[in-house]
Structure formats: C-alpha cells, structure tokens
Image (tube, helix red, strand yellow):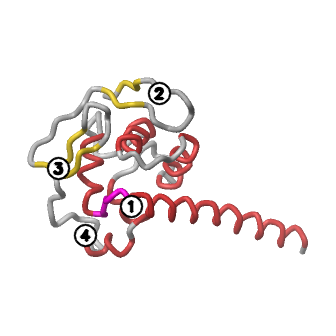
C-alpha cells in the first residue's frame, strides 16, 4: 500500500510540473500578445524543412524568436510534453490543442482542419518577431537569448 501511495504521489508531482509549465507558457504567450490564431503561421515561419512540423531545434528557434524568456531546459521539457508520441516533431494543431483548448475547438472543431488563414509574421534582424505583416522575410540567424550568459548567434535553417 505505501508503494502505491508513493507512486501515485510521484505521478501527481510530475503532472504538477507539466501543468505549471503549460500554464506559464500560455501566460507568457498572452503577455507577449500572441493568440492561438498566430500559432499556425509561427510554425510555418520556423519550419525550416517545410514538413509541417517543428523538430526540437526549430521549436527552440521559434520560442527564442518570440522572446518568451524560457530557459533551454524548460523549452526542451515543453517540446517533449507536446511530442508525447516521440515522433520527433510537433505540429501547430498539437500546440494549440495543448495550450489553448477553447480556441482549438473554435479554430479546428473536432476534425483538426483549419478553416481560416492566420496572419503572416516577419523576423527582425535580431531574430525577434515583428508581428503580423502582409509579406514574410526570414532572417538567417537569431540571437541566442536564453539567459545562460552567452549571447552568440545561432544559425537558423
């Protein structure tokens, strides 16, 4: 019985961290002015190999470009939470469904099909996002801005 209780507590504790990470990420997205409707275009912008999914590096570049202030370890944990099937990629539908469940049903319904086109975004020369625009221009690199004390350029695509 004590082993069962210990296991249950451990599972709850792991879920607590996962839930808090999702909540903090959603809050930071909203504070930065991003909505669920922006996510598909952001994924498209950072999907270097154009396979419709972001791998872990593309995901890191996207979050760095969005300037959400998440540390690299937390970005990897977040990515792993979305890539629960370990396929090596996450798509915008999975991202929206996990972080914005109400908006997910408004955007995709129960069929996972998008009905509207999201706004385009542009990257500034420092790698930050400029917001909705009418045409896209992608920078070749972005600033390493993960609070680790190193501000080097990271090659993108």
When the figure is inspected, residue 24 is found, relative to residue 101, above or below; the finding is above
What residue does disc 1 label? Answer: 31
- Identify the residue at horizontal 16%, vertical 66% (top origin): 115
Q: Which residue is mark 3?
A: 120
- The local crowd at label 4, few if under 14, some if 14 to 19, many if 20 or more residues have their Cα within 10 Å, is some
The magenta stretch spans residue 150: no
CA gap, disc 2 to disc 4?
Answer: 37 Å
Measured in 3D between alpha carbons, the distance from the residue under mark 4 to the one under mark 1, in whole angstroms, is: 21 Å
Left or right: residue 136 compared with residue 63? left
Q: Residue at x 64, y 66 (%)?
A: 16
Tell me residue 102's x, y (percent): 35, 75
Left or right: where 84 falls relative to 42: right
Q: Secondary structure at mark 3?
A: strand
Q: Which residue is mark 4?
A: 107
Give how far apart the Cα atoms at labels 1 and 2 are.
24 Å
Closer to the N terminus: mark 3 or mark 1? 1
Residue underneath mark 2: 151
- Distance (Cα) linking label 2 and label 3: 27 Å
Q: Which residues are magenta?
A: 31-36
In front of the other: label 2 or label 4?
Answer: 2
Q: Please state which of residues 61 and 54 is positioned toward the viewer in this rendering.
A: 61
Main structural element of the magenta stretch: helix, strand or loop? Answer: loop
Q: Nearer the viewer, residue 139 or 17?
A: 139
Q: Secondary structure at mark 1?
A: helix
Per the image, label 4 sits on a secondary structure element best described as: helix
- Kind of element beneath mark 2: loop
Sequence-wise first label, 1 or 2:
1
- Residue 111 bears which disc, if any? none
Mark nearer the N terminus (2 vs 3): 3
Residue ID at (33%, 59%): 93
Specify the quadrant that holds the N terminus: bottom right
Which is in the foreground here, disc 3 or disc 4? 3
């Amino acid at each position: 019985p004590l082993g069962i209780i210990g296991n249950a507590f451990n599972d709850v504790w792991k879920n607590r961290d996962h839930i808090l990470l999702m909540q903090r990420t959603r809050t930071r997205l909203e504070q930065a002015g991003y909505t669920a409707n922006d996510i598909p275009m952001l994924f498209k912008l950072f999907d270097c190999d154009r396979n419709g999914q972001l791998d872990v590096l593309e995901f890191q570049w996207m979050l760095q470009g969005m300037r959400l202030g998440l540390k690299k370890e937390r970005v990897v944990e977040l990515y792993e939470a979305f890539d629960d099937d370990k396929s090596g990629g996450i798509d915008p539908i999975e991202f929206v469904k996990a972080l914005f469940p109400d908006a997910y049903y408004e955007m995709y319904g129960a069929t996972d099909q998008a009905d509207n086109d999201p706004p385009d975004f542009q990257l500034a020369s420092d790698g930050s996002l400029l917001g909705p625009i009418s045409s896209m221009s992608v920078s070749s690199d972005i600033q390493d801005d993960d609070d680790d004390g190193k501000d080097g350029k990271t090659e993108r695509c």
